[in-house]
Amino acid sequence: MDSTVDALTNAYQEFVAAAAGVLEANEASGGQKTVTTDAALENFKQRWELFRVACDQAEEFVESVKQRIGSECLVDEATGAVAGRTGQGTSTGLPPISAVRLEQMSKAVRWLVIELQHGSGSTSAASHSHSSVPFDTRFSEDAPQ
């Protein structure tokens, strides 16, 4: 995370310095187009692109962390691990499910989303032959643990 923050900070500082360079070159030339102002503008464009790339990378990092935290919370909630760790007896009224079952359902949902994005109308369980574990809709392994 520190490297992501450092990269974003450096890219921002270079972008701001390049913007200042454009203003200084423009003022020095009296607002006329010169080789110096063109070079300053080109540097500004490059620094802008590098800053955008750094922002995109930081955003990807944040999204991956959000997904990981969300997945961990979902697994904890679904398997009942949260109540066990915190000592709280609060429950959603649903029995906990096994982590294997949760992963199975998660894979099924991901494939359904992919199929929907590709416009496939076939959403039957038979279309999930790519999964190493077939999707079972009976919830037999979700018996109280």
Image (cartoon, helix red, strand yellow):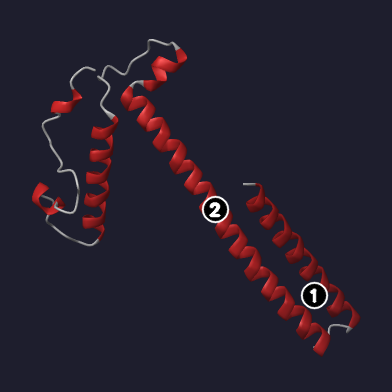
Looking at the rendered structure, the secondary structure element under dot 1 is helix
**Residue under the point 53% across and 50% down:** 61
Q: Which mark is residue 59?
A: 2
- The disc labelled 1 sits on which kind of residue? Val
Disc 1 packing (10 Å; few <14; some 14–19; many ≥20): many
Q: Quadrant of residue 68?
A: top left
Q: Quadrant of residue 20?
A: bottom right
Residue 87, percent from left and from top: 44, 11
Above or below, 26 relative to 120:
below
Q: Earlier in the sequence, mark 1 or mark 2?
A: 1
Please count the marks in the image: 2
**Residue under the point 77% across and 69% down:** 19
**Residue under the point 26% across and 27% down:** 98
Outermost residue toward the front?
132
- For the C terminus, the quadrant is top left
Residue 65 in sight in this render = yes
Residue 34 in sight in this render = no
Disc 2 packing (10 Å; few <14; some 14–19; many ≥20): few
Q: Name the residue that disc number 1 marks.
A: 22
Residue 21, percent from left and from top: 82, 73
Front one among 14 and 71: 71
* Left or right: 60 as drawn, with respect to 35: left
Front one among 56 and 99: 99
* Left or right: 40 as drawn, with respect to 3: right
* Left or right: 46 as drawn, with respect to 108: right
- The disc labelled 2 sits on which kind of residue? Glu
Above or below, 94 relative to 26:
above
